[in-house]
Amino acid sequence: AAGVIQSPRHLIKEKRETATLKCYPIPRHDTVYWYQQGPGQDPQFLISFYEKMQSDKGSIPDRFSAQQFSDYHSELNMSSLELGDSALYFCASSLRTAGFTDTQYFGPGTRLTVL
Amino acid sequence: ELKVEQNPLFLSMQEGKNYTIYCNYSTTSDRLYWYRQDPGKSLESLFVLLSNGAVKQEGRLMASLDTKARLSTLHITAAVHDLSATYFCAVEVNTGNQFYFGTGTSLTVIP
C-alpha cells in the first residue's frame, strides 16, 4: 500500500538559509499535518490542512509557512533558519470519516540539520 | 494550555512482566491515539480510541480510554524484547485537525 512520502530525507543548511520540505500524502487522504520533533522530544504540531485549506495552526514560527497544492501535496517553507530548527520534521496524512480522524499515517521524516 | 502527560517517562522491565503506561490530558476530548516510535524512525499507529470506555487490544498491548477522568492507559502483558520503543499518546482537539502528543514513554524490555 502507498505510504506518505517525504523529501528530502536529509537536509543540511546554514544559519539564515531557507529550506523547503515536501510531503506527498496517501492517495485520497484529505488531511495533511506537519510536526517538528527535536531530539528526545515529543512531536510538536505545527500546522494542518484539510482539503487544501489551512485548518489549524500549532506552534509554527512566523518564519515558517506551509501550503497544500491542488494535487494534495504539501510544502513546508522555512526561512532564516536557526540552530534550534534542527529536528526531524514529519508529515502525516489522514482521512476524516463521519467527522473524526481515523488515524494519522506518518511519513519517514526529513532530518534537518542547521549548521 | 493543553497538557498531555505520560507516566512513566522511562520504563525498564523484564521480559514476561506486565506494566501499564498512563496518559493524562487536560482538555475535553473523546479521541485519543497511541503511537509507537523506534529510535530514529517514524511513528506507527497502534490504537485509535474514539469514545469513553473504549478498549482495544492487539497482541500484548491493550489500550483503554476514560474520557471523564481524561485518562488513557496502555497495558503491556508478558513483555517481550521486541516491544522496546518509545510510546506516545496523542489527543485530538478542536476541529480534529490538531493533535497534541504526550511526553512519551521510553520502554526497554530486558531479556
Image: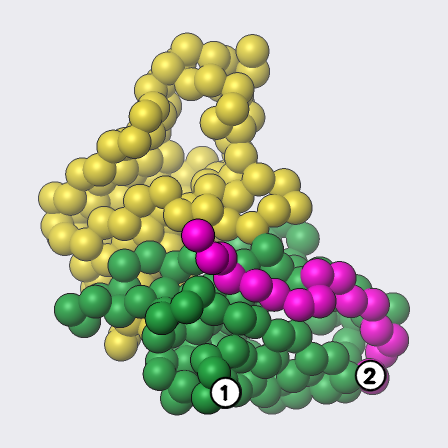
Chain colours: A green, B yellow
Circle 1 sits in a helix, a strand or a loop, which is it?
A: loop
Residue A7 covered by magenta stretch? yes
Percent position of residue A95, x then y: 31, 67
**Classed neighbour count for the residue bearing mark 1: other residues with Cα under 10 Å, few (<14), some (14–19), many (≥20):** few
Q: Which mark is residue A69?
A: 1
Circle 2 sits in a helix, a strand or a loop, which is it?
A: loop
Quadrant into which the C terminus of chain B falls: top right
Seen from the viewer's position, the closer of residues B98 and A52 is: A52
Q: Is residue A55 visible?
A: no
Q: Residue at x 59, y 80 (%)?
A: A75
From the image, tell me which residue sits under label 2. A17
Residue B44 in the image: above or below residue A38: above
Seen from the viewer's position, the closer of residues A63 and A10 is: A10
**Magenta segment boundaries in residue numbering:** A1-17
Is B6 positioned to the left or the right of A81 in the image? left
Give the residue type at disc 1: Phe
Residue B64 covered by magenta stretch? no
Seen from the viewer's position, the closer of residues A47 and B3 is: A47
Percent position of residue A67, x then y: 52, 87
